[in-house]
Image (spheres, grey):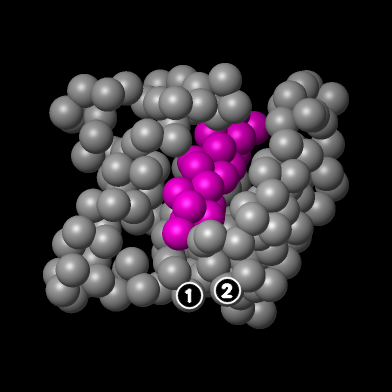
């Protein structure tokens, strides 16, 4: 059960990263993200998958975010969310999040419980915003610890 929750949250984090990557026009950054995502997809979350691999993957995510300043985009969206300055930026991000999930169910197979009904959209929106917060914190010294704590705990 814990592993399933961990993997569901990891899928949602990856969806958030993909939504943020779409703000970039640099093909190298986009390709680097897809290589990172596919690295995890190749493992297909089988029962044999070990915790060390997942920690290495989280470290790669942290490095990718730090190297490409993705946390700055997340911070900008969060600031707009908290101050309600530009709701269209938040709406764009959430729409991208929804679109990526429902378009790529085969990639994000661990979060099958997401549905497109109105009541489920609230939970999806909350997950999208929480993931932005996590992405914004990943560049910090304790970023991986914060992320790991979130992924492990219910």
Quadrant in the picture for the N terminus: top right
Foreground residue among 13 and 147: 13
Residue at 37% x, 34% y is 99
Element assignment for label 1: helix
Q: Is residue 68 left or right of residue 118?
A: right
Foreground residue among 83 and 67: 67
Element assignment for label 2: loop
- Inspect this view and state whether residue 54 appears: yes
Residue at 83% x, 44% y is 53
Tag shown at residue 50: none
Foreground residue among 130 and 101: 101
Query: Which residues are drawn in magenta?
Result: 2-23
- Residue at the disc numbered 1: 72
Answer yes or no: do the residues labelled 1 and 2 have beta carbons within 8 Å? yes
Q: Is residue 121 left or right of residue 85?
A: right
Residue at 22% x, 39% y is 122
Q: Answer above or below: position of 8 versus 96.
A: above
Residue at 57% x, 20% y is 106
Q: Where is residue 126 in the image (x, y as percent from the top left)?
A: 30, 48
**Counting other residues with Cα less than 10 Å from the Cα at mark 1, is it few (<14), some (14-19), or many (20 or more)?**
some
- Inspect this view and state whether residue 13 appears: no
Q: Answer above or below: position of 103 versus 21.
A: above
- Looking at this rendering, what residue extends furthest in the bottom direction? 141
**Separation of marks 1 and 2 at Cα, in angstroms:** 6 Å
Q: Position of residue 140 (x, y in %)?
A: 60, 78
- Residue at the disc numbered 2: 69
- The image quadrant that residue 35 belongs to is top right
**Counting other residues with Cα less than 10 Å from the Cα at mark 2, is it few (<14), some (14-19), or many (20 or more)?**
few
* Main SS category, magenta section: helix
Foreground residue among 110 and 101: 101
């Amino acid at each position: 059960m814990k592993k399933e929750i961990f993997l569901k949250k990891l899928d949602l984090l990856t969806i958030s990263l993909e939504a943020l990557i779409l703000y970039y026009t640099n093909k190298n950054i986009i390709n680097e993200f897809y290589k990172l995502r596919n690295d995890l997809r190749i493992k297909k979350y089988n029962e044999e998958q070990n915790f060390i691999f997942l920690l290495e993957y989280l470290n790669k995510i942290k490095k990718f975010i730090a190297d490409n300043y993705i946390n700055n985009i997340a911070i900008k969206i969060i600031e707009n969310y908290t101050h309600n300055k530009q709701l269209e930026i938040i709406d764009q991000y959430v729409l991208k999040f929804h679109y990526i999930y429902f378009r790529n169910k085969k990639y994000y197979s661990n979060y099958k419980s997401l549905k497109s009904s109105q009541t489920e959209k609230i939970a999806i929106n909350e997950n999208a915003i929480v993931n932005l917060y996590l992405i914004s914190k990943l560049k910090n010294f304790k970023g991986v610890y914060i992320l790991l704590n979130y992924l492990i705990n219910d």
